[in-house]
Amino acid sequence: MKTEKQKTITTTNLVLLGMMTGVLLLMAYTPLGYLNIGPLAISFNMIPVAITAIALGPVGGLITGSVFGLTSFLQCIGVGGVSAMGAILFQINPFLAFIQRFVPRALDGLLLGYIFQLIRARRGSLHLASAVTGFFAAFLNTLFFMSMLVLLFGNTEYMQNLIGGRNIIAFICAFVGINAVVEMFSATVITALVATALVKARLMHPAEIRGAHKAVTV
C-alpha cells in the first residue's frame, strides 16, 4: 500500500510528464524549439526529454522521446511544419522514414533514464548527473539520427548525391556541422540548470536506482 509521500511523488511525476510532453509539443510546432543564429539552427527539443528521463527514469524518457519522434515524422508529411529532407525520405520509403525519424528519439529517451541513474548510483551529484544526461540527450540524438539515415537510405540516389563521394565520417561531420556542438553544449547547461532548479523547488523528484540514494545531492 502506498504511503501519502509515495502518492504525492507519483502525482507530481505524472503532472511533470504531462507538462514536459506539452512543452515538447509546443517547442516542436513553434519557433520556441529552435534558435536561429545566422546560418545555425539550434534545436532544444531534446531537453524536455532529458528532464523527463531524469524525473521518471527510462520509461519517462521513452514516452517523451517517442512523442518527439512522432512529431519529427509528422513533419515529413507537413503536419506542424515541413521537413524538406523528411518529405524526400517519405517519398522514397514511408516506413523507413518513420523508423529513421521515430526510433532514434525513442531510443535516446530510454537510454537517458539509464544514464542518469547510473551516474547517481555512482554517487554523482544531481547537477553533474543532469549535465551529463543533457549532453547525451543531444549527442545520442545526433548519433542515432545520422546512423539511421546512412543505414536506411545510404544507398539511395538522394543520399549518394548528398554524400558526394566522401567517406561516411566526413559526410556526417560536414552535415551536422557546428550545430551539433552548440546543441550539445546548450543541452548540457540548460538541462543541468532546469533539473536542479525543479528539484530544489520540490517540483520534481529525480528517479534513482532503488537503494542507490536516499537523499538528493545537488
Image (cartoon, rainbow, N blue to C red):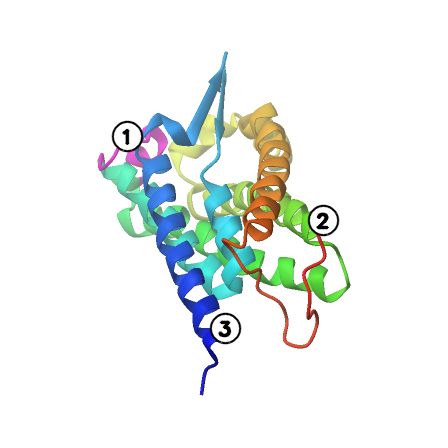
> In the rendered image, which quarter is residue 23 located in?
top left
- On residue 51, the disc is none
Mark 3 vs mark 2: which is more N-terminal?
3
- The numbered mark at residue 5 is 3
Q: Amino acid at mark 1?
A: Val
Q: Amino acid at mark 2?
A: Leu
Residue 84 highlighted magenta (yes or no): yes
- Residue that carries the numbered disc 2 in the rendered image: 128
Is residue 166 at least partly visible in the picture?
Answer: no
Q: In which quadrant of the rendered view does residue 92 lie?
A: top left
- The secondary structure type at the circle numbered 3 is helix
Q: Give the mark nearest the N terminus, 1 or 2.
A: 1
Q: Is residue 19 left or right of residue 52?
A: left
Expressed as whole percent of the image width and height from the top left, the position of residue 34 reads 43, 27
Residue 154 is inside the magenta segment: no
Position of residue 50 measured from the top left corner of the image (x, y, whole percent): 53, 49
Q: Which mark is residue 82?
A: 1
Q: Are marks 3 and 2 in contact (CB under 8 Å)?
A: no
Residue stretch in magenta: 78-89
